[in-house]
Image (spheres, rainbow, N blue to C red):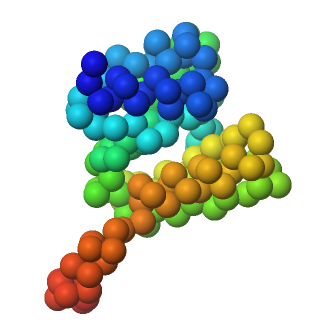
Amino acid sequence: MDVFSRTFLPAAAEAGVAIPTVSRHLPIFRHCVEADDATVLVTRCVRRTRPMRGEFLLLLTQRRLVITHESRLMHRLHLHLNTELRHLTNVIWNPDPRMAGVELAVTVIDGVRERFWIRVGHPKHVWRLDALLTYVFRPRRSDRAAMAFNPVVAL
């Protein structure tokens, strides 16, 4: 069993995503993600900009962000977003324990700004989600040191 398979199913179960939903979206995710990429988060989300009817499923690995969309009426699956994390800019998330959710906003490489609302079951889980996003999107100490000495980044 590869790393993606070993980490995807437990992450989906932790988020409470139903097995039929996971089964429908899994072929698209498997096509987008490499076998040695570990899953960090699988969750349902709602698009905040230009809402589309239907369900979105967000997959966050250590290297990629993949979001699929399932239409409400025909249950057709579409790949909404598939990008490497290094191609995302201006990544911001706002945890809101009162509403038991986190708003995630990213700018994709082509300049499109995407905003998603991730609802969690309990206000305490908001901080777990915040910690996962911090783990994935905050640069490591060695990355910050390399950026500080890079003259191109300093401009």
Residue 107 position (above or below residue 66)? below
- In the image, residue 73 above or below residue 33: above
Nearer the observer, 87 or 12: 12
Marker count (numbered): 0
Q: Is residue 138 visible?
A: yes
Quarter-wise, where is residue 3 in the image? top left
In the image, 1 versus 107, the foreground residue is 1
Residue furthest to the right in view is 98
Task: Name the residue rendered at 69%, 46% in the picture.
Answer: 125
The residue positioned 50% from the left and 31% from the top of the image is 11
Residue 148 location (% of width, % of height): 26, 86
Looking at the image, is 119 positioned above or below residue 53? below
User: Does residue 99 sit above or below 39 in this rendering?
Assistant: below
Q: Using the rendered image of the protein, determine whether residue 31 is visible from the camera's viewpoint.
A: no
Q: Is residue 48 left or right of residue 137?
A: right
* Residue 142 percent across, percent down from the top left: 27, 74
> Where does residue 37 sit, x and y in percent of width and height?
28, 37
* Residue farthest along the left direction in this orientation: 151
- Horizontal side of 107 relative to 20 (left or right) equals left
Q: Position of residue 38 (x, y in %)?
A: 34, 38
- Taking the spot 55% from the left edge, 10% from the top edge, the residue there is 20
| The N terminus - image quarter | top left
For the C terminus, the image quarter is bottom left
Q: Is residue 145 left or right of residue 81?
A: left
Depth check: 113 or 119 in front?
119
Left or right: where does residue 11 sit relative to residue 137? right
